[in-house]
């Protein structure tokens, strides 16, 4: 299990009994002699040294005296923090009564499990804080509160007005017209409000602020805050500056992902610097395949460079062979899913099934913007372990806004993710949409 | 006897719907779109019931309710609070402030009619 906490290697040695044993052995003393000098039996000292018995203050003082050290040195090892953590974990489970008097025995005999328990206790506390933060946000977030109020007010009007129209046979024509108009206004308002609400709840910023973001989201939020470009790579020492920023990300996993991303970005940058790419784009010679051929680099690398070019309007998604999104640079009008799988109709997945065959598709995402995009997708395979190892596929889809689409060109209707996609009767739907009931 | 209802609600379409429903049920409905003139309107209209939205521009529904309850003349005036569904804290605050009834949006017209009848003795 890659994410399990590793027990500290010196844990056993840092518990009181182990420290006594360590000190005795370092001095070359026999257990029996030390026990006799301290006025206890050898078997009792043996239990103490193996952390099977707690050592009282008086005996500890005598042992410290025999071993020529201070009681504090023997009792204040790094294991003290672990013992405190275990006590704290015990305090949070009032219905269970663990053997508190044998806590050192437990930590000494099972240091790995003790570390796991302590780590779980920390994780539970962290999650409780995050839930509390989210709960607080749901209650006090002015944006959320305003959005909910807007939706519920529109809904109240729609419900009441629709019921009047449905239940009143002898309604005056003037009133009927007025209510039809109100219904239309409120349904528009409801659609806008619901869409804003879903977009807000699906946004990564909420999770990052609440400490619930996935590592990938942390990295993407960092990139978004920088405007999705890493211009520092052009300057001397720029890579180190960026690495420092990555080093400040909240989670270790995000720092690791961010560092790997930066190394890849730097390699891409060396092959295709901003100036060269900007010149190519300015002359219209921006076909990723042709750019890749001319520079001896992969098409995916060119796509990454195009997405991270300063001022670039292009969005980019990259996935692995399982379809899991590894990278998401959003573009206005083309929402990308934060949770779960993306829309299976994305050309990205068509490319994934046909390595090295480019897929160029005009798409129109679901939503109110009705904006179209030209998407360029391709899948590449690599063999990090040669013929003997697995072929690892990675596909990318460059998303280019097309604000002047050709009216006659075929357009593929796509969504974001089934859960928040309003498209009715979609043949690729995996699960019902939460927006379906609203008729959006 | 025709029940006089003062509706203080800033959403015009909700106001129209409630006015229509209650008018057909025999109520005389006066509407006000913000909280600023609410107390004066109550004193002038002398309603049998006030339907009061919690979130109003200017003065909040809770402030208006507190003022009504502080005035001996309106201390026992039936006041129905309207607010968005799920705002548990709002409901508690309204109950503490002396609301006679609490209705959440979206509401059903039947519930609205029934509540108004109960509060006006209709």
Image (tube, coloured by chain):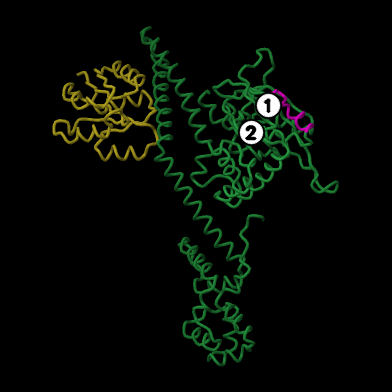
Quarter occupied by residue A37: bottom right
Which SS type dominates the magenta stretch? helix
Query: Do the residues at discs 1 and 2 belong to one chain?
Result: yes
- Please give the label number shown on residue A252: none
Query: Does dot 1 land on a helix, a strand or a loop?
Result: helix
Quarter occupied by residue A119: bottom right
Residue A93 location (% of width, % of height): 48, 61
Residue B16 location (% of width, % of height): 33, 17
Is there a contact, CB below 8 Å, between mark 1 and mark 2?
A: yes
- Please give the label number shown on residue A309: 2
Q: Quadrant of the N terminus of chain A?
A: bottom right
- Please give the label number shown on residue A281: 1
**Residue A93 highlighted magenta (yes or no):** no
**Residue A291 highlighted magenta (yes or no):** yes
Tell me the chain of label 2.
A
Of residues A399 and A196, the one drawn nearer to the viewer in this rendering: A399
Q: Which residues are magenta?
A: A281-294
* Colour assignment, chain B: yellow
> In the shown orientation, is residue B105 left or right of residue B52?
right
Residue A23 location (% of width, % of height): 59, 82
Q: Residues within 10 Å of mark 2 (few under 14, many from 20)?
A: many
């Amino acid at each position: 299990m890659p994410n399990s906490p590793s027990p500290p290697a010196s844990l056993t040695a840092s518990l009181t009994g182990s420290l006594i044993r360590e000190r005795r052995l370092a001095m070359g003393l026999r257990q029996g002699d030390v026990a006799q000098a301290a006025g206890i039996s050898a078997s009792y000292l043996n239990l103490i040294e193996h952390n099977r018995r707690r050592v009282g203050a008086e005996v500890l003082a005598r042992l410290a005296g025999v071993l020529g050290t201070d009681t504090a040195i023997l009792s204040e090892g790094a294991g003290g923090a672990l013992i405190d953590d275990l006590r704290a974990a015990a305090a949070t489970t009032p219905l269970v009564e663990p053997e508190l008097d044998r806590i050192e025995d437990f930590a000494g005999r099972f240091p790995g499990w003790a570390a796991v328990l302590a780590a779980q206790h920390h994780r539970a506390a962290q999650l409780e804080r995050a839930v509390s933060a989210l709960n607080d946000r749901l209650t006090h977030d002015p944006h959320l509160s305003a959005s909910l109020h807007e939706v519920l007010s529109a809904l109240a009007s729609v419900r009441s007005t629709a019921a009047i129209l449905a239940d009143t046979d002898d309604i005056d024509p003037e009133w009927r017209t007025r209510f039809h108009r109100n219904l239309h206004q409120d349904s528009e308002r409801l659609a806008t409000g619901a869409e804003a609400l879903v977009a807000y709840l699906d946004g990564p910023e909420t999770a990052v602020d609440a400490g619930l973001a996935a590592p990938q989201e942390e990295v993407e939020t960092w990139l978004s805050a920088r405007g999705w470009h890493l211009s520092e790579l052009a300057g001397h020492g720029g890579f180190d500056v960026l690495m420092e920023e990555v080093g400040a990300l909240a989670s270790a996993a995000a720092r690791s992902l961010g560092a790997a991303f930066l190394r890849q970005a730097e390699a891409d940058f060396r092959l295709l610097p901003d100036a060269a790419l900007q010149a190519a784009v300015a002359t219209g010679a921006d076909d990723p395949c042709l750019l890749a051929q001319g520079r001896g680099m992969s098409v995916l690398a060119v796509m990454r460079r195009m997405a991270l070019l300063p001022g670039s309007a292009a969005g980019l998604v990259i996935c692995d062979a399982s379809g899991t999104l590894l990278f998401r640079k959003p573009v206005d009008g083309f929402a990308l899913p934060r949770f779960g799988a993306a829309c299976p109709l994305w050309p990205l997945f068509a490319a994934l099934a046909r390595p090295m065959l480019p897929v160029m598709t005009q798409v129109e995402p679901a939503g109110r913007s009705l904006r179209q995009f030209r998407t360029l997708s391709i899948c590449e395979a690599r063999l990090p372990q040669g013929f003997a190892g697995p072929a690892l596929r990675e596909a990318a889809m460059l998303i280019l806004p097309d604000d002047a689409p050709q009216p006659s060109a075929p357009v593929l209707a796509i969504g974001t993710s089934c859960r928040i996609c309003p498209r009715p009767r979609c043949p690729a739907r995996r699960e019902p949409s939460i927006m379906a009931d609203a008729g959006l | 006897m025709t029940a006089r209802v003062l509706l203080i609600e800033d959403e015009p379409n909700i106001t129209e719907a409630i006015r229509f429903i209650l008018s057909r049920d025999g109520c005389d409905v006066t509407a006000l779109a913000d909280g600023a003139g609410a107390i004066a309107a109550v004193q002038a209209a002398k309603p049998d019931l006030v339907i009061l939205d919690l979130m109003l521009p200017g003065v909040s529904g809770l402030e208006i309710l507190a003022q009504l309850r502080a005035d001996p003349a309106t201390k026992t005036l039936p006041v129905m609070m309207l607010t968005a569904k799920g705002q548990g804290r709002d409901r508690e605050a309204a109950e503490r402030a002396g609301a006679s009834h609490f209705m959440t949006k979206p509401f059903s017209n039947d519930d609205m009619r029934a509540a108004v009848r109960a509060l006006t003795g209709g």
